Image: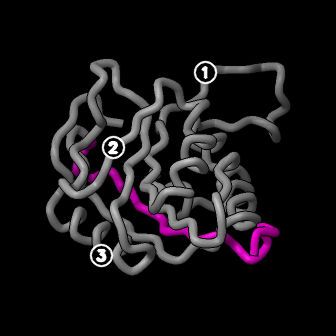
Amino acid sequence: MPERNGSLSLSFERLLMMGFDRLAPGPVTVLTTSSEEGQPLFDPPSSWHTAQEPSWQDLSSSATRLLGQGPVLLVPPWQRHRGDRSRTRREVSFYVYDDVLRACRPADTSSAMAVLTPAELWLSDSPRAAELRKTLAEHWDILAVIYSTGVIPEIHPTYLVEPCSCRPGRNTGRR
């Protein structure tokens, strides 16, 4: 993720705002981890709120809590895990966002969340990405995925990112 903050591209910001307007009207909270400087990773639209957790391990529980108050744009860290050789290859989560997304649960049936991840999660045929998508589908219905480049400051303009819009799934046991 970027090390300094700045504004999202205007077209990307408008797409996110339109998506949330349809998904769940009301103020959106952007949830992420704190940067080293304690600043948000990017400036959200002025009508949105920002919440930061000091550690990625707290993001899932914070997302569930915040989803009880309104829509959330979750921006988990994109870095790789630092090696834990004690786990088998099948158990390994290569990226921090794998673990964050696996643990995210809707607060209730009105929960509305978008997640900003590298597009690789949605495009890859790798067993890791396929398994993560399957796990997400146990709790969330994926409504829309938008692929875009050049939208976040400090990320190379050709890097493909995407927000994915989600609502509680039919299989969550919460409907």
Task: Residue under label 1, please give it.
Answer: 82
Local crowd at mark 1 within 10 Å, few (<14), some, or many (≥20)? few
Going from N to C along the chain, the mark reached first, 1 or 2, is 2
Q: Residue 156: percent from the left, percent from the top? A: 25, 44
Real-space CA distance between mark 2 and mark 3, rounded to the nearest whole angstrom:
18 Å
Residue at left 65%, top 71%?
Answer: 109
Residue at left 56%, top 41%?
Answer: 62
Task: Give the residue type that dot 3 points to.
Answer: Met
Query: Do we see residue 106 in this rendering?
Result: yes
Query: Does residue 122 belong to the magenta stretch?
Result: no
Residue at left 50%, top 62%?
Answer: 113
The magenta span reads: 155-175
Task: Residue under label 3, please give it.
Answer: 18
Task: Residue under label 2, please give it.
Answer: 50
Residue that sits furthest to the bottom in the current view? 22
**2 or 3: mark nearer the eye:** 2
Going from N to C along the chain, the mark reached first, 1 or 3, is 3
Real-space CA distance between mark 1 and mark 2, rounded to the nearest whole angstrom:
27 Å
Query: Does residue 173 belong to the magenta stretch?
Result: yes
Q: Residue 149: percent from the left, percent from the top? A: 28, 58
Query: Do we see residue 119 in this rendering?
Result: no
Quarter containing the N terminus: top left
